[in-house]
Image (tube, rainbow, N blue to C red):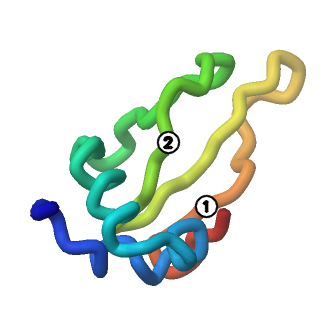
Amino acid sequence: MSGPDPSLVRDFPFFRNLTDDDLRAILAAAKTRRIERKGLVFAQGQSAAEFFVLMHGHLKVVQIRPTEGRSSCGSSSRASFTA
């Protein structure tokens, strides 16, 4: 089976114990998406229909609370990915 190199995600804890063939199958079905600065990855309350892996950059998670307004729930970068 050919396709994307499994080393692209091998270092992520979630993928660490999968075989190269398993990783190739996952990567073959994956889609690359580039999000612009301050772009929306998913919206609060939206049903979870996708799994995201942050390959480059930094991600900030923000929650909107009706009584408190906008608050930061956390942030992540490739180096701090955990499953």
x and y percentages locating residue 15 in the rendered image: 51, 69
| Identity, as a three-letter code, of the amino acid under mark 2 | Phe
x and y percentages locating residue 47 in the rendered image: 61, 18
Query: Foreground: 49 or 17?
Result: 17
The residue shown at (11%, 63%) is 2
Q: Residues within 10 Å of mark 2 (few under 14, many from 20)?
A: few
The residue shown at (55%, 53%) is 60
Q: Which residue corresponds to mark 1? A: 75
Residue 47 numbered tag: none
The residue shown at (80%, 25%) is 65
Label 1: element kind = strand
Distance in Å between CA atoms under marks 1 and 2: 17 Å
Query: Foreground: 3 or 72?
Result: 3
| Identity, as a three-letter code, of the amino acid under mark 1 | Ser
Decide: is 37 above or below 42. Answer: below
Q: Which residue corresponds to mark 2? A: 51
- Residue 39 position by quadrant: top left
Q: Nearer the viewer, mark 1 or mark 2?
A: 2
Decide: is 40 above or below 44. Answer: below
Label 2: element kind = loop
Query: Foreground: 83 or 71?
Result: 83
How many numbered badges does the structure rendering display?
Answer: 2
Residue extending furthest right? 67
Decide: is 10 above or below 53. Answer: below
- Pointer 1 or 2: first along the chain: 2
Asked whether residue 25 is in view, the answer is yes
